[in-house]
Amino acid sequence: MGKHFVFDGLNTTDIMVSRSTVVDLRNNGVALKHSPTGQEWFIPTNGKPEEGAKVFAKEPLRGFLNTPIVENVVAGGGVVGAGTACAIRMENHKFPGKVRLLNSGNQTAELTAICAAMRMDCESFDRMRSPINLVLPQKSDRVVIKEPLTAGPEELVDGHFRRVARTVADGSALATVSTKDAGLTALAVSMSNGARRYFQPTGSLSPELTLLMLSVANEVVCNFEEWKMLAKWAGVSVPNFTESSDEAHKAAAELLSAMYERGLAATEAAVCTLGVKGSVGADWMKERVSRVSLQLLDGSKGLPTPSGAGDRFLGEWVFLRETWSRQGYLRHPIEATIVRITHSVANFLGLDRGQYDVEFARV
C-alpha cells in the first residue's frame, strides 16, 4: 500500500505577471504599467518590495485576475509547494504511496489541476478564502505581493472532524506548513494517529500556539529570520544580522540549541535554512549540530535562493526522512539528508556537478 504523507496548510492563487508589464518597485508599494495597453496601477504595501522578498498589499488583489497583466494563474502556497516537491520525489523514485493536501482554503481550478498532474489527493475545507498573490518577474528572482488574509475561520463542526480523521488516519507523516487555521491544524495533529509530525513555522498562528507546536513536533524546519522570531517569542536573545552574515552558521546553531533547552525546537531534529549559506541541522537524538554549505568552485558567493525554496526543502525533507535516512543505517542521518537536499537545490538552480561542492562540518 505504501506510505501516505499529509501536508496541512492554505493554498493561494498566484497571478504570474507578464513580462510586458513594467514593474516599478517603490518604498511604499509597486507601480505597474501594461505596455501594450498603457493601463497603470499602484499597489500600496506594508513594506518596501525588494527582489526575492514577500510583502503584503494593503488592499485586495482579486481584481487583477481580470486585467491584461495576467500571463498565467497557478496554485501556490506552502502546502502546495511542499506537497508537490514530495510528490515529485515519490514519482521519480517510483515509491508507492500518496501525498494528501489538507487545505483550509478553496478548491480552486488551479489547485485541482496541479493535484491531478502530481497525482495528489486534496481535501479542501473552504474555511478561509484562498488569498491572491501577484508574482512579479525581476532580473534574477521575483517579488511576491501577497493579499491580506480574510477574517479567521469559523469554529469546527462535526463534518470537519470526520473529514480530517479520514484524511490523516493512515498517514505516516503529517507536515504542518505555515498554517493559517489554528482549529484545523490542532484537529489534524490530534487525529494523526501516531504519524510523525513535521512543522514549518510561522504562518499566522498565535505565538503561544506556535510554541506549543514546536514542543510537540518531531522535526521542525524553517529559515533564519523565522527562527529569530520564534526565539524572541521564547525570550531568547537573537542576533542583529541576517542569514548573509559570515556568523550565520554559528548563530543558527546557538539559536537551535537555546530553543531546544527550552523544549521548543522539536523532539528529534531541527533545521535552520540559510539561503546561499546552506543550512544548519541539529540531531537531538545524537546530540550533534552540523552545518552544510554549498560552495561554488569559481569562488563566487553563491546564487540567489528562489522564492518557494523553503517549501521545496520541506517537501523533500519529509520524503527523505520517511523513506531513507530514518532507517537506522546512516551514521549521521540529519547531515546526510541536508546534503542530499543541497545537491537537489543545486540541480534546481541549474548547476552542473562540476560547478559546486557541498561541505559539511560539526558546529
Image (cartoon, rainbow, N blue to C red):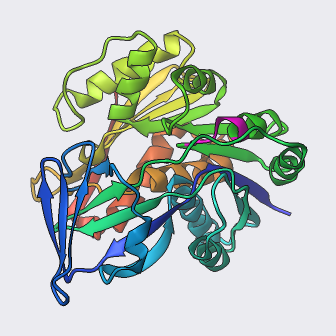
Please state if 167 lies on the left or on the right of 8 as rendered. right
Q: Position of residue 116 (x, y in %)?
A: 67, 78
Q: Is residue 17 above or below residue 218?
A: below
Give the quadrant of residue 219. Answer: top right
Q: Quadrant of residue 351?
A: bottom left
**Res. 274 visible in picture:** yes
Which residue lies at the image location 25% right of the left edge and 48% below the top edge?
Answer: 276
> Which residue is drawn at the image coordinates 16% and 31% (left, top)?
246
How far across and down, in percent of the image, does residue 311 sit? 47, 53
Residue 183: say if magenta.
yes
Q: Residue furthest bottom?
A: 36
Q: Quadrant of the C terminus?
A: top left
* Picture coordinates of residue 20, whole percent (x, y): 20, 83
The spot of residue 218 in percent (x, y) is 64, 31
Q: Quadrant of residue 224?
A: top left
At x 81%, y 53%, the residue is 167
Quarter of the figure that contains the N terminus: bottom right
Residue at position x 54%, y 49% in the image: 317
| Residue 181 highlighted magenta (yes or no) | yes
With 252 as the anchor, is 335 left or right in this view? right
334 and 145: which is toward the camera: 145
Report the side of 88 relative to 14 (left or right): right
* Magenta stretch, residue numbers: 179-184
Q: Is residue 351 visible?
A: no
